[in-house]
Amino acid sequence: MAAARTPGDGPPIEEFASVFRVHEVRTDGDRLLYVGRPTVSADALEREVHPLFREYGYEISLRRHQPAGPTGPGTYALVAEPQTVGVDGIPWTNVALALATVATTLFVGSLWYQGNAFADPASALRAWPFTAAVLGVIGTHELGHYVTSRYHRVDASLPYFIPVPIPPFGTMGAVIRMKGRIPDREALFDIGIAGPLAGLVATVVVTVIGLHLPPVTNPFGVQFNHPLLLQAIAAATGRQLVYSDPRLIFNPVVFGGWLGAFLTFLNLLPVGQLDGGHVVRAMFGERTETIGAAVPAALFGLGAFQLLGRSGEVTLVWFLWGTLALGLAYAGPTTPISDEGLDRKRFALGVVTFLIGLTCFTPVPVSA
């Protein structure tokens, strides 16, 4: 049996001896295995040792090492794996999805500009402002998450864009994958709120630019209704969002801002793994589950109200998101390792962000 000694690049055993009695230390490649028995609960052990191992550049997890038997109560292993933050090599999957999303948004953009990428490939190239607006807003949102994840040393992937060659979007947005544990409420709050705030800045910029560009003929025959945020931007810039000629619609670049506002509202729904779920979990702790349970009911109620109040004309998106929110509420929010309360400045920022998110809400986003 190997001696219980401290590896040269690991934390001293003495610093966590009160919560975990080490019998043996092993190495497995670049991993360190501290074999022994915890003296506290698994949650208390993780709260105690996680910050310590992070200081030494390791992520830690507790695993069963040897089951209990006639010879003893069994042992556990604290498995320390080198912490990795950032991109290792070329992320080919991310690159491929990004290029595919450029293609699908150029295709859909060509329709916005009264072209057809199949019949006239050059019309797709003319749609680059639409593509830049849509992907700029979505990419900025995800970049906010990625940068704050790096700041808090939480391993996260680059954005995975989702290409969908269907009008009027050409994409279903993007996601990043969180690989590391969230150390505390501050990190959970910062990572959750950074995406919506960055996306809102991009939304305002794209909308202002688009409002200064000429309108186009509506290629889809539907009406896009505008949230209060876009109406306020139009009023502040003295530009039009709605035209007297029903055949005209705002410039496709504005649609990047419209989409940004819509996605911001959806992402700020305070439930589960959504950005709003992260933020409200950091603000209210375990009480978040009560808030999250109310979200599906509110969305289903909104859909039902529209079904009855609009003589059968219903915006199906609220039923769809009610169903998604139900699954998210069941899965629950992300729980940070340290569950200490949030400071007042972050709490106030959270309240303000949710209020801004309400200005992105449109009861009937699209109507015939």
Image (spheres, rainbow, N blue to C red):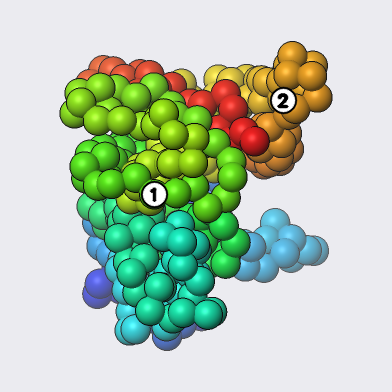
Instruction: Please identify, in this view, whether the residue under mark 1 or under mark 2 is nearer the observer.
Output: 1
Residue 204 seen in the figure: yes
Residue at image location 31% in from the left, 30% down from the top? 240
Residue at image location 60% in from the left, 61% down from the top? 166
Residue at image location 62% in from the left, 33% down from the top? 367
Between 194 and 335, the one lying in front of the other is 194
In the image, is 128 to the left or to the right of 64? Answer: left
Between 133 and 50, the one lying in front of the other is 133
Relative to residue 237, is residue 121 depicted above or below?
below
Q: Position of residue 121 (x, y in %)?
A: 44, 81
In the rendered image, which residue does mark 1 sit on?
216
Q: Quadrant of residue 232?
A: top left
For mark 1, does the 10 Å Cα neighbourhood hold few (<14), some (14 to 19), or many (20 or more) residues?
some
Kind of residue indicated by mark 2: Gly
Using the image, tell me which numbered label, if any, was put on residue 260.
Answer: none
Between 263 and 128, the one lying in front of the other is 128
In the rendered image, which residue does mark 2 sit on?
303
Q: Which of the image's four quarters has the C terminus?
A: top right
Q: How many marks?
A: 2
In the image, is 31 to the left or to the right of 89? Answer: right
Of label 1 and label 2, which has the lower sequence position? 1
Secondary element under disc 2, as helix, strand or loop, is helix
Residue at image location 25% in from the left, 62% down from the top? 56
Q: Position of residue 251 (x, y in %)?
A: 35, 47
Q: Position of residue 148 (x, y in %)?
A: 27, 49
Q: CA distance from mark 1 to mark 2?
A: 31 Å
Kind of residue indicated by mark 1: Val
Residue 174 seen in the figure: no
For mark 2, does the 10 Å Cα neighbourhood hold few (<14), some (14 to 19), or many (20 or more) residues?
many
